[in-house]
Image (cartoon, rainbow, N blue to C red):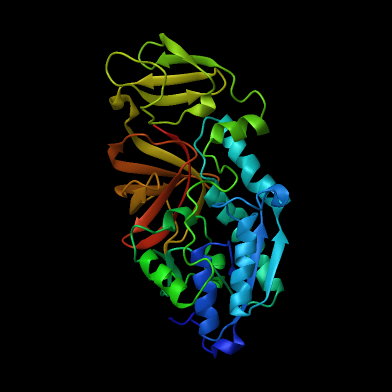
Amino acid sequence: MSDLDFDRAPESVRVVVAMSGGVDSAVTAALLAEAGYDVVGITLQLYDHGAATGRKGACCAGQDIYDARAVADRLGIPHYVLDYESRFSKSVIDDFADSYLRGETPIPCVRCNQRVKFRDLLDTARDLGADALATGHYVRRVPGSRGPELHRAVDPAKDQSYFLFATTAEQLDFLRFPLGGRSKEETRRLAVRLALPVAEKPESQDICFVPSGRYAGVVEKLRPGAADPGDIVHVEDGRVLGRHDGVIHYTIGQRRGIGVGGGPPLYVVRLDPERREVVVGPRAALGRDRVIVREVNWLGDRPLDDAGTRVAVKLRSAQPAVPATIQAGPDGTAEIRLDEPQYGVAPGQAAVCYDGERVLGGGWIARAT
């Protein structure tokens, strides 16, 4: 167990651990307790007032809360459950629904980290007299010449740095990520060695408040009328090719399940919620080499300016980073100029910038041209 970058004995350092009920946060808490830190576990109840009590695979509700408590009991550490449901609903779920209404493809897990876990929970940790907040994310906090830096995890298959781009320098100073230098297999082995009751628990694959994977159904429930039907039109001449059951069922770059057949392959090129149109066309019509991002969070040593900074940028979590230049724009925006056109750049996703292994920051994709 590596130290947490404190210059005093572990027993004098209080660490609050965000315990979701999964194996990663459980091992995080166990390693810190084993190393002698003063560990306090906190689990956030984020939705449905415990209605998911018997459901497996959720996050921060129901069974997971009981699992987190069982781990805390096994470790002999204090454990608290905080009701953050109203904050989560306003900051994450409502934003998720409204993003779909704008024709975007949102990433609610980033918003949850940004607006709940790394903001509200961090403040609660400080109120409890903590010196740090630790999580089970696979990302590394590395000392730098200007303060701690955010780096990719050692295990590229588990790296979560894309989802943490909105972490500020102030938050990073308080955060710790003990699993960033480990593989998932090593974490599982540690869970077994430490006899944690969640050692064999499977990972959650769905968004926590959309356990069925039916995003559109959640949006329809929250925003009646969101699934109003409309036309599927061709990008080249506007001719109507078919009908759809709601713009919220589509995302930029989508090829399968569009609802029109015959002829060359067609992709979703643009969504127009106001006109209730899904615009489709050939793959070539998807190419974009300029991306405008909003709500930019920058962690680089040199501030963004008009001259531009060379970066590698990820435009979706599962895609590799590509070379680009980012320069500052007005009102917290920035423009990313891609060296080569990219296909399927979707508003609502994140554009995350890297310098090698280091995360330089990023922003939310507003539009691409």
Q: Residue 321: where, in percent of width, then height? A: 32, 50
Residue 344, compared with residue 140, is above or below; it is above
Q: Residue 62: where, in percent of width, then height? A: 65, 54
235, 163: nearer the viewer: 163
61, 114: nearer the viewer: 61
63, 38: nearer the viewer: 63
Residue 179 placement: quadrant: bottom left
Q: Residue 280: where, in percent of width, then height? A: 39, 20
Q: Residue furthest bottom?
A: 9
- The quarter of the rendered structure image containing the N terminus is bottom left
| Residue at left offset 45%, top offset 31% | 251
- The quarter of the rendered structure image containing the C terminus is top left
Q: Residue furthest top?
A: 239
Residue 278, compared with residue 112, is above or below; it is above
Q: Residue 217: where, in percent of width, then height? A: 59, 32
| Residue at left offset 43%, top offset 14% | 233
Residue 55, compared with residue 99, is above or below; it is below
Residue 122 placement: quadrant: bottom right
| Residue at left offset 50%, top offset 75% | 195
**How many numbered markers are drawn?**
0
In the rendered structure, the answer to whether residue 81 lies left or right of residue 57 reads right
Residue 244 in sight in this render? yes
Residue 146 in sight in this render? no
316, 73: nearer the viewer: 73
In the rendered structure, the answer to whether residue 233 lies left or right of residue 343 reads right
| Residue at left offset 43%, top offset 63% | 138
In the rendered structure, the answer to whether residue 167 lies left or right of residue 355 reads right
